[in-house]
Amino acid sequence: MSDREYERYLRQVAERRAPAVAEADRLLSQDRYDDAERTIRAVDDSIYGAVAMAKIYRHRLEQLVLEGVNADTKPRLVRVFERAVMAAWSAYPEPHTEIEAENYSRGRATDRAELVKILGYDPDD
């Protein structure tokens, strides 16, 4: 497949995924996490779909933090944080070399740290 064909393929997948992303975002606003994830996977079960899901969770976490972090909202925030971490981590393919494993480990740590920064604290501490 040429670069041009691959770019066209990626655009087509993104166009097909766009309505699912909007629906998944709506489902997340209702705390329907599994349904949101299934919606994305139904149209794009690739690494690109996983990346899209991770972005949606990140955005949802940002929205909830803007609404306020307090004793009443913390359980929901922690649930979304944990799902956001898992979604981000699922966007990494299985490593096949030691270097890939190190890079993925570093990338996953960075992803988690960014989500902790958004949340404002580490729920594991």
Image (cartoon, helix red, strand yellow):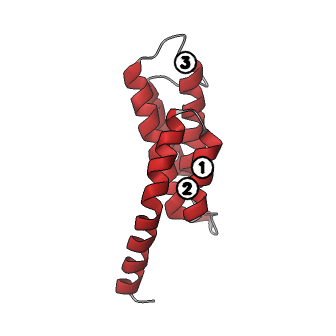
Direction top: furthest residue? 71
Give percent across and percent down for residue 46.
56, 66
Residue at 58% across, 53% down: 39
Local crowd size for mark 2, using a 10 Å CA cut-off: few (<14), some (14–19), many (≥20): many
Disc 1 to disc 2, C-alpha distance: 5 Å
Mark 3, secondary structure of its residue: helix
Q: Can residue 44 be seen by looking at this rendering?
A: no
Locate the C terminus by quadrant.
top right
Give percent across and percent down for residue 50.
54, 56
Residue at 45% across, 56% down: 19
Give percent across and percent down for residue 75.
60, 20
Give percent across and percent down for residue 86.
60, 44
Residue at 57% across, 46% down: 36
Q: Could you say which is closer to the camera, residue 95 or residue 28? A: 28
- What residue does disc 1 label? 37
Mark toward the start of the polypeptide (2 vs 3): 2
**9 relative position to 71: left or right:** left
Q: Can residue 105 be seen by looking at this rendering?
A: yes
Mark 1, secondary structure of its residue: helix
Tell me the kind of residue under disc 2.
Ile
Mark identifier at residue 40: 2
Tell me the kind of residue under disc 3.
Lys
Residues under numbered marks 2 and 3 in contact, where contact means CB atoms less than 8 Å apart? no
Mark identifier at residue 74: 3
Residues under numbered marks 1 and 2 in contact, where contact means CB atoms less than 8 Å apart? yes
